Amino acid sequence: AGQAAERRCTRRAEWVARTEAEDREAKRTARREREEVRARVRARLREAAGEEGPDVSEAMVSAEVVKSEEDAKAFGGDEVKVISREQLQKLESELAVSLEVQAAGVEESGASSAAQQAFEARRAEIRRRRDTLRKPRAAAVELLRQTVAAGSRMTLDSLQHALQVARDAVLEGDRDGIAGNGRWMVLEVKEIHLALAELRKVEEERAQFGARQLELAETSLRSSCFGRDRFGRRYFALERPDGEPTLTPTIFVQPRTHDVVGGLEESPPTEISINQLPEMFNFSASAGADDIESAAPAEISEATMPAERDISPQNWLCYDGEAACTQLAQSLDSRGIWERSLQAAIETYVRNMASRRIAHKQLQEL
C-alpha cells in the first residue's frame, strides 16, 4: 500500500509539472501569435492609408484584429462580405435586370446549348430568389435572431438547424454574382456562424479539461471534501479504488453524530445508508443499519442504485447521479457562507464529471 501511494505521489508530481509546462508554453505561443497578427494588421492598415493618410492608432489595429479573429474563427480566414437584407434584395434585383439584358446577347452569340442552359438556370434562380423568398427570408431572419438571443441555452443542434433554414432561404452564398466571385451572407447568418464557432471551441476546451481530469483522477490519493453545511456535516467525493475513472458524480454526506446535529431543510429523494454502498467504495456496513428498498432512477445502474427513504442520524447519505447531486446543491441555502461555498463546489464537481464523460467517450471512440 505504501509503495502504491508513493507511486501515485510521483505520478501526480510529474503530471503537475507537465501540465504547468504545457500551460506556460500555450500562453507564450498565444502571446507570440497575437503580436504577429497585430504586426501584420498594422502594416496592412498603414499600406492602405498611404503616406498622406491618417495615422494608424492602436485602437484601429485592435478593432481590425478583432474582426480578423472573428473571420478566422468562423470562416477559417476566408474573406466574407456581410450585407443587409435590403442590400441583398437590391443586388438581386440589379443582377436580375443585368441577366435579362445579357439574355439576348447569349442567344445571338451562338453559344453552345449547354452554356445557354446554364445561363437560363442562373437567370431563373435569381428570379426565384427575388420574387418568392421574401416571406421565407423574413421567417428565417426571425429564427436566427431568436436562436442567438437564447444565449447560454444555445446548442449545436439549434444553431445548425437555424443555419440550414437560412441556407434554404438563400441568406448566404458563394460566387453567385451577388458579391462578385466571393462569399457573402447577411449579418444574422454571420452571428450564427460566430456562435457555432464559439460553442465548438467551448466543447473542445471542455473535452480537453475532461481529459486532464481523467489523468488527475489516476493520481488521486484521498477523498475530496467539498465543505460543510450549516450543521457542520462534511460532503465527500471518492475516486474508484479499482483504477477505473469515476464518470458519474457521487457525493457522500457525513452522518449526524453527537457533535453534528440538524439536517437539510429539503433533502433530495435519492438517499441510501452506508451498508448499501457498492463494494467498489470499500466501505464496511455500520452495525444495525436498516435494510433499504431500492427505488433508483432509470439513469443509475444497478451497481449504484440509491433508495428513497429517511435515514437515521447514524448513517451516511449517498447522492448518486447528476440529477441527485444537482438537487442536493439546489437544496442548500446560498445565503450562508458555508453552504454557498459548498453549493458552488458541488456544481463545479458535477460539471467536471460531465467533462470527464465527454473526454472518456472520445477516448473510447479512438
Image (cartoon, rainbow, N blue to C red):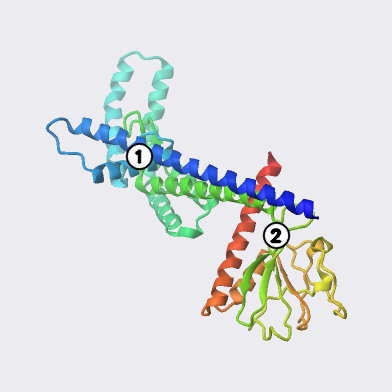
Which kind of residue does numbered mark 2 sit on?
Thr
Numbered disc 2: secondary structure = loop
Which kind of residue does numbered mark 1 sit on?
Ser
Q: Height in image: 119 above or below 327?
A: above
Q: Position of residue 174 (x, y in %)?
A: 40, 33
Q: Residues within 10 Å of mark 1 (few under 14, many from 20)?
A: some
Is any atom of residue 174 visible in this view?
A: yes
**Residue drawn at point x = 31 percent, y = 33 percent:** 40
Q: Position of residue 200 (x, y in %)?
A: 52, 46
Q: Are marks 2 and 1 in contact (CB under 8 Å)?
A: no
In this view, which residue lies farthest toward the left? Answer: 52
**Residue drawn at point x = 25 percent, y = 46 percent:** 59
- Distance between the alpha carbons at the discs numbered 2 and 1: 41 Å
Question: Image quarter for residue 345?
Answer: bottom right
Instruction: Read off the residue under disc 1.
Output: 68
Q: 289 and 155: which one is in front?
A: 289
Quadrant occupied by the C terminus:
top right
Is any atom of residue 294 visible in this view?
A: no
Q: Residues within 10 Å of mark 2 (few under 14, many from 20)?
A: some
Q: Position of residue 207 (x, y in %)?
A: 59, 48
Q: Residue 286, labelled with which disc?
A: none
Specify which label sits upstream in the sequence, 2 or 1. 1
- Tag count: 2
| 160 sits to left or right of 137 | right
**Residue drawn at point x = 45 percent, y = 55 percent:** 147
Instruction: Read off the residue under disc 2.
Output: 248
Question: Image quarter for residue 55?
Answer: top left
Q: Height in image: 82 above or below 249?
A: above
Quadrant occupied by the N terminus:
bottom right
**Residue drawn at point x = 69 percent, y = 41 percent:** 365
Q: Position of residue 42 (x, y in %)?
A: 27, 36
Numbered disc 1: secondary structure = helix
